[in-house]
Image: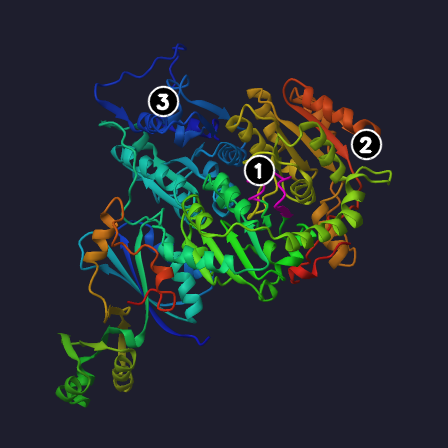
C-alpha cells in the first residue's frame, strides 16, 4: 500500500540493508515469530493460495512468506478489493477457504465490500490484516484504522491479535468458524509487534470445537417426519433450493431426494448448478428475472420446500402475497433464517447433507406428472414469447442471450461461468448451461459490481482444470479493470467476455420501466478495451456482427491463455421476465 | 402484534468487542436499547448481558436468534416482565442543608426504601433499588429540594424459571453433543421460544 509512506517508518528504514542476497532470518530452536506461525497454520490447514497486497503493517508476514514461497502461492493483486473477490472466486470454485492478506488502514478498508459480499453469500474466507504496533492502538497512528469495529457487522467472526503466542489458536479457531456451519468471512487483525515477536511454538492444533459455537445442530427426526408427512400428502409440492445444497456438499443427496419424490425444483442464482440444467425436474430459476413457471406456480403450490435458501426479497417479491396458500417446509443450517422472512410450517434445522437422506427415506416415491406438466406449459409460453427471440434473434443487434447461448454450444455447459452484476448477470444465470456443481459464481446478496473479473481469476486458481469464463458488463469491468494486471503477471487463463451495451443497463432498464425513461447518468463510455487488454499483454477482439460471434467465441476458448472478447449488444435491450419491485411473484411480466 | 417490554438475557464468552456485536444487531434495525447491563454470571468466565427492549415478540424472536448466531454467544433468553424478577438501582445527590432542614429524613428513608450512602457537610447521596416507578417516585419527591445529580443503573434481572447455566454449560462444553442436548430447541418450543 505504502512503499513511499513507509519510508517514514524508522524501524523499516533500519531493515533496509545494502546486502542484496536475501537470507532467511535465523530461527531460534523451538521459537517462531508470529508471522511464521501464521504461515505454519496455513500449511497445516492445507492452504495453497493466498491473494494479497503488501504494505507497512503486514511486512513481517510478507518477509516470512519469502521463505515459504515454495509451499504457499501468493497472488499479487492490484487492489485489495480485487484480492478479496479473487479469494471469494477461489472459495466458490473449490469449496475451500479463500485467504486474503492486506495491510492496515486503507488496505484493510478496501476489503470491506468483499467482506460484505462474502458475508451475505456465505463464502468461507480468512482475511489477515496488518495492524499498527499494539502500543500505538488508538493513537491515530499512521495507517491505523479500527478495522475490527468497521468489519464487525460483515464478518462471521473477527479478532485482533496483539500477542504472537495467540496466533496458532486464533487461526485454528478462524478456520473452524469460516468453514463450518453456515460459512462466512473471518478477519484476523494482527498488530505488527505480534507478527514480529518470537514465542515458543508448540505446533499447530486444529480446532474442532468452540463451546459457544454450534455449527452443526443435532438433527431432530420428528421435524423431518412432520415434513415428510406434509410432502407425502401434497398434490402440488414445489422445491426451492439455494446455495446451501452446494455449501453442504449435498448435491447427490439433493438429487436423490427430488428424484425419489418426483417434485419439481427451482433454484436461486446462488444455488444454480447444484444439479444439471437439463435435469428433467429442474424447472428453472426463481426470482425477479427468473423463469415464468417457477414464479407463477409458487403461488399455486400446496407445499413449498425450501432447502438451503433464505427467501431473499429478490426471490420472494412482495412478501405478503408470497406462497400464502402453501404449507412451508424450510431446511436450513442457520436457525436465524427459519421464520425470518417466510414463516415455516415445519422448520428443519440442520445440515442438509444429513437431513436430506432422512427425508428421502421417509418420502414416498412419486411422479407429479400433471403438476410438472403445468411447469412445462409455462415454460413453453416463455420459450415462445421471449426465449426464442433472445437466443435466436432476428434483429440486427446481437443480444446478450445469444452470446451465452453460443458459449453453451461450444462449452457444452462444462465451464465455470463467473458474472458481475447487472443485466448480463441475469441473462447468464438464465441461459447458461451447467453440467456440474460450483459452476455459477456470482455476487448474489450484495450485488457487487466489480466482482466478476477478480472472482474469475480466483475461480481459475481454485479450479485450474476447468475453463473459467467471466461475463461482465461495460459498467462492472471498469470498477476492477486493474486486475488485468494480475492476469498479466500470473498468466492465469481466464476468458473475459464483455457484454457492452454502452449503458449501465440494469439501472437504465428500471429508468425506462419505472422512471419514464429519464436516463439519469446511465450513459457510460468505455475505453478501447482491446487496446487496454493488449496493454496488459492479453489478446482480444471486438465483435459487433452476428456472423463473427461464434468464431470469436471459439477463438477465445481455443486461445492459449487469457482472452478478452468484447461483444457489442443491443443498447436498450431489457431483461425479461421481470417481477417488478413491490409486486407478487405471480405478477411476473413477460414484456 | 403488540409492542411490549422484553428483557433479553445473553450468556456470552468474556470477549472484547462482543458488546458491539450485540449492540449493532439492534442499531441496524433501528431498535432502541432501553437499558443494557453487562455483568459476571453465576459461572466464572461467562458474562451475562441484560437488555431491555420495547418491541413486538416477532421482532424480539428474530433479534434473539441473530444474537445467538454470534460465535461467542452461548445462549439467549427473552422474557416478559411477569417471567422475571428485576431491579434497577438509583442514586440521588441533594444538598445536605436543604434536605436536613426541610425533610424528615427518617420518614423519607422508610417510605421510599432509600438508604443514605454518603453524608457530607455539603451533600448527601441516597440510594434506592426497585422498579422504574419506584425510583421515579423518589425523584419526584426530591426535585423540589434541588436534586443536584441523579443516575439510574441498567436493569438486572433473574429469570424466575431458570435453573442457572451450569447444566447448559456442560452441554456446550461437550465436544460432541450428547443425547440429552436439546440443540434444536428453537424448533422444539416454537411458541415459548427462549423462555424457560
Mark 3 or mark 1, whichever is nearer to me:
1
Locate residue A235: give its quadrant: bottom right
Image quadrant in which the C terminus of chain A is located:
bottom right
Q: Which residue is mark 3?
A: A64
Query: Do the residues at discs 2 and 3 belong to one chain?
Result: yes
Residue A89: % across, % down: 53, 34
Rendered location of residue A361, percent (x, y): 44, 48
Is A135 on the left-hand or right-hand side of A75? left
State the image quarter where residue A195 is shown. top left
The residue beneath circle 1 is A441
* Residue labelled with disc 2: A544
Element on which disc 1 rests: strand
Mark 2 or 3, nearer chain start: 3
Q: Which residues are magenta?
A: A270-284
Q: Are marks 3 and 1 on the same chain?
A: yes
Mark 1 → mark 2, Cα distance in angstroms = 26 Å
Amino acid at each position: 500500500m505504502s512503499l513511499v509512506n513507509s519510508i517514514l517508518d524508522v524501524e523499516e528504514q533500519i531493515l533496509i540493508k545494502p546486502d542484496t542476497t536475501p537470507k532467511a532470518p535465523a530461527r531460534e530452536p523451538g521459537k517462531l515469530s508470529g508471522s511464521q506461525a501464521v504461515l505454519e497454520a496455513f500449511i497445516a490447514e492445507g492452504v495453497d493460495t493466498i491473494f494479497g497486497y503488501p504494505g507497512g503493517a503486514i511486512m513481517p508476514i510478507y518477509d516470512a512468506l519469502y521463505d515459504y514461497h515454495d509451499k504457499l502461492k501468493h497472488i499479487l493483486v492490484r487492489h485489495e478489493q480485487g484480492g478479496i473477490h479473487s479469494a471469494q472466486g477461489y472459495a466458490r470454485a473449490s469449496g475451500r477457504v479463500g485467504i486474503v492478506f492486506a495491510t492496515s488502514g486503507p488496505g484493510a478498508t478496501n476489503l470491506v465490500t468483499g467482506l460484505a459480499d462474502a458475508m451475505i453469500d456465505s463464502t468461507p474466507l480468512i482475511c489477515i490484516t496488518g495492524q499498527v504496533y499494539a502500543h500505538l492502538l488508538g493513537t491515530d497512528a499512521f495507517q491505523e484504522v479500527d478495522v475490527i469495529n468497521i468489519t464487525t457487522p460483515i464478518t462471521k467472526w473477527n479478532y485482533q491479535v496483539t500477542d504472537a503466542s495467540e496466533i496458532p489458536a486464533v487461526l485454528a479457531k478462524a478456520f473452524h468458524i469460516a468453514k463450518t456451519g453456515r460459512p462466512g468471512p473471518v478477519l484476523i487483525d494482527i498488530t505488527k509487534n505480534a507478527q514480529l515477536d518470537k514465542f515458543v511454538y508448540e505446533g499447530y492444533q486444529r480446532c474442532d470445537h468452540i463451546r459457544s459455537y454450534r455449527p452443526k445442530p443435532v438433527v431432530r427426526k420428528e421435524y423431518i417426519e412432520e415434513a415428510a408427512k406434509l410432502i407425502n400428502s401434497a398434490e402440488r409440492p414445489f422445491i426451492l433450493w439455494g446455495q446451501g445444497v452446494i455449501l453442504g456438499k449435498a448435491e447427490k443427496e439433493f438429487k436423490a431426494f427430488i428424484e425419489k419424490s418426483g417434485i419439481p425444483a427451482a433454484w436461486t442464482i446462488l444455488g444454480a448448478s447444484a444439479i444439471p440444467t437439463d435435469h428433467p425436474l429442474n424447472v428453472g430459476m426463481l426470482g425477479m428475472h427468473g423463469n415464468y413457471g417457477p414464479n407463477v406456480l409458487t403461488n399455486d403450490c400446496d407445499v413449498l420446500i425450501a432447502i438451503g435458501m433464505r427467501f431473499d426479497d429478490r426471490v420472494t417479491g412482495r412478501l405478503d402475497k408470497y406462497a400464502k396458500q402453501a404449507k412451508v417446509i424450510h431446511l436450513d443450517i442457520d436457525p436465524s433464517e427459519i421464520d425470518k422472512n417466510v414463516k415455516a410450517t415445519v422448520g428443519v434445522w440442520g445440515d442438509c447433507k444429513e437431513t436430506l437422506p432422512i427425508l428421502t427415506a421417509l418420502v414416498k416415491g412419486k411422479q407429479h406428472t400433471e403438476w410438472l406438466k403445468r411447469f412445462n406449459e409455462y415454460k413453453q409460453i416463455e420459450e415462445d414469447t421471449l426465449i426464442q427471440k433472445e437466443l435466436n434473434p432476428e434483429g440486427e443487434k446481437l443480444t446478450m442471450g445469444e452470446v451465452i447461448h453460443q458459449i453453451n454450444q461450444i462449452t457444452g455447459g462444462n465451464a465455470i461461468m463467473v458474472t458481475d452484476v447487472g443485466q448480463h448477470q441475469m441473462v447468464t444465470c438464465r441461459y447458461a448451461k451447467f453440467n456440474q456443481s460450483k459452476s455459477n459464481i456470482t455476487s448474489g446478496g450484495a450485488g457487487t459490481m466489480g466482482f466478476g473479473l477478480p472472482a474469475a481469476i480466483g475461480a481459475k486458481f481454485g479450479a485450474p482444470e476447468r475453463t473459467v469464463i467471466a461475463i461482465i458488463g461495460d459498467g462492472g469491468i471498469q470498477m476492477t479493470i486493474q486486475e488485468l494486471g494480475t492476469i498479466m503477471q500470473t498468466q492465469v487463463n481466464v476468458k473475459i467476455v464483455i457484454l457492452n451495451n454502452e449503458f449501465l443497463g440494469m439501472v437504465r432498464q428500471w429508468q425506462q420501466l419505472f422512471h419514464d425513461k429519464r436516463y439519469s447518468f446511465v450513459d457510460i463510455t468505455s475505453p478501447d478495451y482491446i487496446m487496454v487488454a493488449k496493454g496488459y499483454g492479453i489478446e482480444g477482439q471486438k465483435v459487433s456482427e452476428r456472423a463473427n460471434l461464434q468464431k470469436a467465441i471459439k477463438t477465445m476458448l481455443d486461445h492459449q491463455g487469457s482472452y478478452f472478447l468484447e461483444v457489442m449488444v443491443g443498447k436498450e435491450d431489457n431483461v425479461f421476465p421481470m417481477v417488478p419491485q413491490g409486486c407478487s411473484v405471480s405478477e411476473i411480466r413477460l414484456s | 402484534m403488540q409492542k411490549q417490554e422484553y428483557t433479553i438475557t445473553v450468556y456470552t464468552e468474556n470477549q472484547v468487542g462482543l458488546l458491539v456485536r450485540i449492540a449493532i444487531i439492534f442499531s441496524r434495525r433501528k431498535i432502541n436499547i432501553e437499558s443494557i447491563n453487562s455483568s459476571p454470571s453465576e459461572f466464572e468466565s461467562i458474562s451475562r448481558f441484560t437488555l431491555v427492549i420495547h418491541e413486538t415478540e416477532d421482532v424480539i424472536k428474530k433479534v434473539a436468534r441473530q444474537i445467538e448466531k454470534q460465535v461467542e454467544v452461548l445462549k439467549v433468553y427473552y422474557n416478559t416482565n411477569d417471567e422475571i424478577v428485576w431491579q434497577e438501582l438509583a442514586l440521588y445527590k441533594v444538598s445536605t442543608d436543604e434536605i436536613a432542614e426541610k425533610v424528615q429524613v427518617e420518614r423519607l428513608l422508610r417510605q421510599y426504601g432509600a438508604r443514605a450512602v454518603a453524608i457530607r457537610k455539603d451533600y448527601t447521596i441516597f440510594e434506592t433499588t426497585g422498579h422504574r416507578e419506584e425510583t421515579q417516585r423518589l425523584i419526584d419527591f426530591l426535585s423540589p429540594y434541588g436534586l443536584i445529580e441523579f443516575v439510574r443503573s441498567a436493569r438486572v434481572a433473574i429469570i424466575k424459571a431458570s435453573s442457572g447455566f451450569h447444566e447448559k454449560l456442560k452441554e456446550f462444553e461437550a465436544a460432541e453433543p450428547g443425547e440429552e442436548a436439546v440443540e434444536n430447541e428453537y424448533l422444539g418450543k416454537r411458541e415459548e421460544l427462549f423462555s424457560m
